[in-house]
Image (cartoon, grey):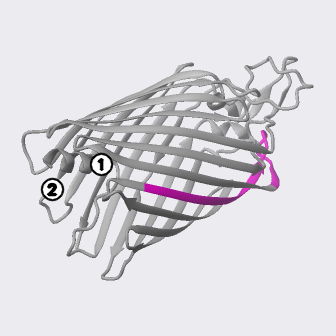
């Protein structure tokens, strides 16, 4: 029983703490700092700086009253400083004529409500996100059911995103707006295999249509001319994920998953993530966990290197996110319960990401919160 209790707790360690039985309100504050650099920016045709920094505070508010309803609202702001996107303001001589695109702020809000009916949970969510060249409105439904003496949980989530893209071209000129629509469906099954093991199986399908290019991404053609990225106006993405959380003891629990992804743009990718969690011999509930993530990806049919795309080609992009590469993420996390009036938990993660082509990033994130 102790092993199963510890395992179930660590299964949700990446989620925020829930409310205790006699508590109705919970507030959590999350913060992160992200820094990246590289020399293959799609803003300048697959060459040039990818320098970017982001600071992102987030507040999550939960309410669970005496009724079967529970409510969650998430508010956040991302402050982005990017030398890469600042290059869309270069004139023909390569001079930066404006710094307006160097800094951007993204604000977002997501609200959801869930009702418990017997062994089922029914939920709905709404969201809004806005930045200088992008606006997104989202809505979703989700359902889950426990069965097999609560050893099995089946879930379905449907989300719809309606986006409006401001078409800043490769010279930073506003060319109007266009639309993008995305529909995501996720099917999931979690299963307690034994007192030591929990397995999770997920299938993800996404359908996108509308303007799917990034209008200020450049492509350098084989004759040296510079033009705008062109991509199809439809995309279907699928992914299958299998996870296993295994308790070797009360003090050592491994969280892991393997994910396969592909789409009809020709990309296929595999991801393996491992997080062994070690309980430290002090504090009420204190854990330290190394983070390892390995990713390999085949390129999109439309991805080209600089100076290699013929002008007659229908679609092309120099975005290395759609290219062929291997990447690794590694880091360390720390989580503990606190007996403090300021916070009842502390979670800190520090990670380093590297990718072929000298791209790298650094991220530090933390969370704390309290209930009443």
Q: Report the residue marked by disc 1.
A: 13
Q: Quadrant of the C terminus?
A: bottom left
Secondary structure of the residue carrying numbered label 2: loop
Q: Residue at x 40, y 49 (%)?
A: 190
Q: Report the residue marked by disc 2.
A: 338
Residues in magenta, as a range = 154-176
Mark 1 or mark 2, which has the lower sequence index?
Answer: 1
257 vs 73, nearest the viewer: 257
Q: Residue at x 64, y 60 (%)?
A: 160
Q: Is residue 165 left or right of residue 285?
A: right
Distance from Cα at disc 1 to Cα at disc 2: 15 Å
Secondary structure of the residue carrying numbered label 1: loop
Residue 220 on image: x %, y %: 79, 24
Is 354 magenta? The answer is no
- 35 w.r.t. 270: above or below: below
Residue projecting furthest to the bottom: 66
């Amino acid at each position: 029983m102790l092993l199963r209790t510890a395992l179930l707790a660590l299964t949700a360690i990446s989620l925020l703490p829930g409310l205790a039985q006699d508590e109705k309100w919970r507030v959590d504050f999350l913060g992160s700092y992200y820094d990246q650099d590289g020399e293959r920016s799609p803003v300048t045709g697959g060459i040039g700086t990818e320098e970017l920094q982001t600071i992102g505070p987030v507040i999550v508010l939960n309410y669970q009253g005496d009724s079967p309803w529970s409510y969650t609202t998430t508010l956040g702001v991302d402050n982005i400083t990017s030398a890469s996107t600042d290059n869309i303001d270069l004139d023909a001589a390569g001079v930066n004529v404006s710094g307006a695109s160097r800094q951007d702020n993204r604000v977002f809000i997501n609200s959801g409500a869930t009702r418990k009916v017997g062994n089922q949970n029914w939920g709905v969510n709404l969201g809004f996100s806005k930045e200088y060249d992008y606006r997104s409105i989202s809505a979703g439904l989700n359902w889950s059911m426990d069965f097999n003496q609560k050893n099995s949980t089946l879930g379905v989530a449907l989300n719809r995103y309606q986006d409006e893209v401001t078409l800043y071209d490769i010279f930073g000129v506003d060319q109007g707006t266009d639309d993008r629509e995305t529909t995501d469906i996720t099917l999931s099954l979690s299963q307690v295999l034994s007192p030591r093991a929990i397995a999770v199986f997920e299938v993800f399908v996404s359908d996108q249509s509308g303007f799917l290019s990034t209008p200020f991404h450049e492509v350098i053609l084989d004759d040296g001319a510079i033009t705008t990225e062109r991509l199809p106006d439809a995309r279907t993405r699928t992914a299958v994920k299998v996870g296993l959380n295994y308790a070797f003891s009360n003090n050592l629990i491994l969280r892991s998953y393997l994910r396969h992804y592909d789409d009809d743009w020709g990309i296929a990718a595999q991801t393996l993530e491992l997080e062994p969690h070690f309980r430290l011999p002090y504090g009420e509930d204190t854990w330290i966990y190394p983070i390892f993530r390995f990713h390999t990806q085949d390129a999109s049919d439309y991805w080209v290197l600089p100076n290699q795309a013929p002008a007659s080609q229908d679609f092309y992009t120099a975005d290395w996110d759609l290219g062929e590469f291997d990447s690794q993420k590694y880091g360390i996390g720390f989580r503990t319960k606190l007996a403090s009036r300021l916070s009842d938990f502390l979670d800190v993660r520090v990670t380093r990401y590297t990718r072929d082509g000298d791209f790298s990033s650094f991220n530090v994130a933390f969370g704390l919160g309290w209930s009443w």
